[in-house]
Amino acid sequence: MAEKSSELFDKIVNLSKRRGIVFQSAEIYGGFRSTYDYGPIGVLMLRNVKDAWWRSMVQLRTDVVGLDASILSPPAVWEASGHLATFTDPLVDCKNCGARHREDKLDDPTQCPTCGVKGELTEPRDFNLMFKTHAGPVVDEGAVAYLRPETAQGMFINFSNVQVTSRKKPPFGIAQIGKSFRNEITPGNFVFRTREFEQMEMEFFVAPEEAEKWHEYWCQERLNWYIDHGMSKDNVCLREHTQDELSHYSSATYDVDFKFPWGWDELEGIAYRGDYDLTQHSEHSGKPLEYFDQVNNKRYRPHVIEPAAGATRTMMAFLMDAYHEEEVNGETRTVLRLHHRIAPYKIAVLPLSKKPDLQGKSQEVFTKLASQWMCDYDETQAIGKRYRRQDEIGTPYCVTVDFDTLEDNAVTVRERDTMEQVRLPIEELATWFAERLS
Ligand code: GAP
């Protein structure tokens, strides 16, 4: 990260709006607090974050399978999981200005941070963070449904379905990416804490005596994932939860923390959930959620290690980590030094001019490359400006088609970080990029 101040935060918010990464939702109506829309560049980057996670967690492994469970679920799930009783924040209202605050986040528990008046805060009351709605036409208690506040429960309630159909044996995992919803009292810091967000979670089921070993394994594995995808080692670390931080289901948790402009904060939690969830759902549903180990003729309830990350939060961390400004020929160059797997576009095809024969050749090159990689095509303004535009959104390579191309069937390839250029025959491009973008 080039900078670590609030200036960096503002630059990321501005870049996001200016370049179509993230927009305030319902902006033409004045915006809707804590909701964001991902624009043409942002949607690519967010998808890449999720694909990179899925690739590492599912595609490259033989011991993890995927799931896509529903967002709407009945109260029974959340009663069993403990979310109805305990997924709460202590809330106080200011009787002077009406502002609402989380009591546990106040510096002075007697003073309203909005209006500064002392002694006007109400007693704290527990505020459940789940979004409640009604499924179907009748609005009564029997029709109550909740938007999931985490994707995890989908994996627990489908444990037997998945285990039997995939024929996996512990140690094995179920992974899921999807939207979750929390009625956060204090959303903020751009997309860091929002009411609607995306999670990437995996429940790894193990024999109880192997839980500690697997917890250590997943902590290391997950930390390495961020570093392997380009994050600076100085900006990510593992941090163990103190006893009073632990969630109701966890006996040990480590966070992967990132150095945000406001300080170290959570990107992902890796919790040891024991057999809490499978026990709760077995007892509440009456269905045994167990595994029968035929080799040892033993029936047991697996324990769970859960690496749970936020996709939207991770994307923001990648943006902050990759943001650099540098002086080039007396001008400031803004460059996102993103790992190629995270970068929105891998290649930009740039015809030197809008002359029809150059356009035709450039389209040909684009079509060839776009069948394998997400490519941009840009023919407006001077070539230098176009390079800068691609640097700013982290495109690793630009391919320039010029007048010589029509003669020698070769193009100039420019690398984002070094700005070095090489001349390559068009027929060699696919192989050249395959070596660098795999
Ligand atoms: N199943 C466990 C679980 O949900 P969590 O720590 O509450 O654990 C996991 O959430 C991750 O989801 C967090 O580390 C964070 O990256 C992301 N996350 C949680 N709440 C969020 C919010 N309001 N906005 C954006 N991301 C959030």
Image: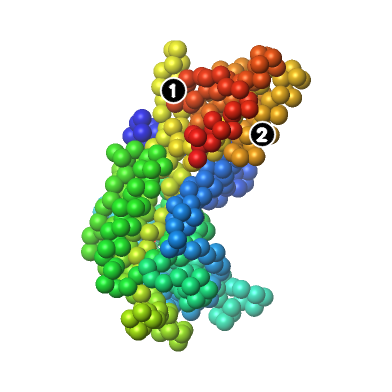
**In the displayed structure image, the side of residue 435 where residue 186 appears, left or right:** left
Q: Residue 194 location, x and y as percent?
A: 47, 53
Q: Which residue is mark 2?
A: 368
Classify 273 as above or below 105.
below
Q: Which quarter of the figure has residue 245?
A: bottom left
Residue 341 in the image, given as x and y percentages of width and height:
49, 41
User: Which residue is outermost to the right?
Assistant: 356
**56 is higher (above) or lower (below) than 73:** above
Q: Residue furthest bottom?
A: 286
- The residue lying toward the viewer, choosing from 201 and 161, is 161
Going from the N terminus, do you reach mark 1 or mark 2 first? Answer: 2
Q: Which mark is residue 418?
A: 1
Left or right position of 81 against 14: left
Could you say which is closer to the camera, residue 43 or residue 227?
A: 227
Residue positioned 23% across, 60% down in the render = 242
Name the residue type under label 1: Thr
Q: Amino acid at mark 2?
A: Lys
x, y (%) of residue 75? 50, 77
Provide the secondary structure element on which disc 1 rests.
loop
Q: Residue at x 47, y 20 (%)?
A: 420
Q: Give whichever of 197, 412 is nearer the camera.
A: 412
- In what element is the residue under mark 2? helix
The answer to whether the residue bearing label 2 lies less than 8 angstroms from the nearest atom of ligand 1 is no
- In the rendered image, residue 72, in percent from the top left (x then y), is placed at 56, 69
Looking at the image, residue 277 lies above or below residue 19: below
**Ligand 1 position by quadrant:** bottom left
Residue 202 in view (yes/no): yes
